[in-house]
Amino acid sequence: MVSRPHGGRLVRRVATGARAERLAAEAREMHVIELPLDLAADAENIARGVYSPLEGFLVQEDYLHVLDDMRLADDTPWTIPIVLPVSPEELAGVGEGDEVALSYGGEPFAVMRVEEVYGWDKREYALKVYGTRDVRHPGVAKLEQMGELLIGGRLELFKPLPHPFSRYALWPEETRVLFEEKGWRTIAGFQTRNVPHRGHEYVQKAALTFVDGLLIHPLVGWKKPGDYRDEVIVAAYEALIDNYFPRDSIVFAVLRMAMRYAGPREAVHHAIVRKNFGCTHFIVGRDHAGVGNFYGPYDAWEIFREFPDLGVIPLFIREAFYCEKCGGFVNEKICPHSEEYRVRVSGTRLREMIRRGEAPPPELMRPEVARVVLSFENPFT
Amino acid sequence: MSGSKGRYTTVSIPVTLYERIKRLIEGTGFTSVSSFVTYVLREVVAQYEAEKGGEVFGEEERRAIIERLRKLGYL
Ligand SMILES: [Zn+2]
């Protein structure tokens, strides 16, 4: 059975038909708040149940509980504050109880009731969510540019945002029905923002050995400069799946959600989100959602101990490497050989090779995948 | 500001059980009987909640979703 949505009920706040038309007409009369793509995507994710049980951007009580206890005010586990920062100028006199239109690219797409306007302490946010105030952390740096006020309140979407990968844009209601139709009872979610190398494939297949199906679920949008471009990741996975995965055990879909690089807290967030997509299990990698040296390699594994009620089972799969003696991909726990036989897959090294136009050796990357990646003139953002 | 004031309440458990838990958690990661009890209760409560069942889609809604999944090539 697919997992129960987080908080018990899949949120769906997407208006259709006459109601959508009415909201669109009303939105034209409202004060408009223009959002950057990451916040607009958060709004759509709320409306589509990706962030169930959230029905809107956090109000202050939930916000403070998430910061301090990693839970919503009703005790539901929740680790990343989903907030809507605005400047006083953007708010332009809008007050609590008013309705505003949320807009992206000059096109209103949702209506939000402003339940609360409140201030926030960005330094406290940085320390609690990112574990640092160091502005070299991309999440901390981004906080600086955000508005000084947060607005909380429920929203309703009346116009889907344009999506660059509509072919792969599945929402929780769709993956849930899909998994049921496939007869899967256990499903592992795999979060990624990379093109797949052999180490990823090993981890995915290790998980798949124990569950009915695997959801490969890359995040698209807003990565750091130097990361792979979204279309490269998608094309690389198409090549991998076509050549190396049984079609009936895998679902490939993309999710538009910004990386926060919040390490352990974000690992839990990623697990909750995949639970809403119907996953019963979630693969937690080495230095999951980490950046630089801000988190220990296995900090993200530790944090899951604090959530006996998460409702999705974390799968802690060790980092894989190629062992010449074992003759295949293995990990620390199953390979007795010394370092001289081990070929470690370094994402940084792979990127350097690709940047030079070299195909990585087949122990590191499948030739079909390498060919696709190298076919792009510039595979990086 | 956002301290833990007002975020805890008291429930009563038998002293014998309290002492038993205290012995049990010695040398474990649990720092207090309260944190142990909170952990165990959350685990149990989540199990009870899960028994309430999950999402139910209406017949027509489900058909529309399946139609979309076919069009995209997922089914
Ligand atoms: Zn070996």
Image (cartoon, coloured by chain):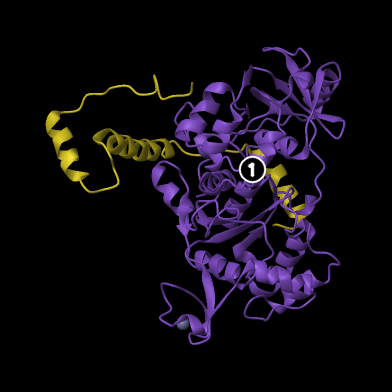
Chain colours: A purple, B yellow
Q: How many C-alpha atoms fall within 10 Å of the one at disc 1: few (<14), some, or many (≥20)?
A: few
Q: In which quarter of the image is residue A239?
A: bottom right
- Give the left or right position of residue A226, taking residue A79 as reference: right
Name the image quarter holding the C terminus of chain A.
Answer: bottom right
Q: Can residue A110 be seen in this view?
A: yes
Vertical arrangement, residue A157 with respect to residue A374, above or below: above
**Image location (x, y in percent) of residue A289:** 58, 52
Number of numbered callouts drawn: 1
Residue with the mark numbered 1: A135
Residue in the image at 45% along x and 44% along y: A311
**Image location (x, y in percent) of residue A60:** 56, 22
- Give the left or right position of residue A162, taking residue A249 as reference: right
- Give whichever of A301, A351 is nearer the camera: A351
- Give the left or right position of residue A288, taking residue A357 as reference: left
Residue in the image at 48% along x and 65% along y: A318
**Image location (x, y in percent) of residue A90:** 78, 22
Which residue is farthest bottom?
A325
- Give whichever of A367, A381 is nearer the camera: A381
Vertical arrangement, residue A186 with respect to residue A54, above or below: below
Which residue is farthest left?
B16
Question: Is label 1's Cβ within 8 Å of ligand 1?
Answer: no
Callout 1: helix, strand or loop?
loop
Q: In which quarter of the image is residue A349?
A: bottom right
The subunit letter for the residue under badge 1 reads: A
Q: Quadrant of residue A63?
A: top right
- Give the left or right position of residue A362, taking residue A164 as reference: left
Give the residue type that dot 1 points to: Val
**Image location (x, y in percent) of residue A97:** 68, 12
Residue in the image at 80% along x and 38% along y: A161
Q: Is residue A184 visible?
A: no
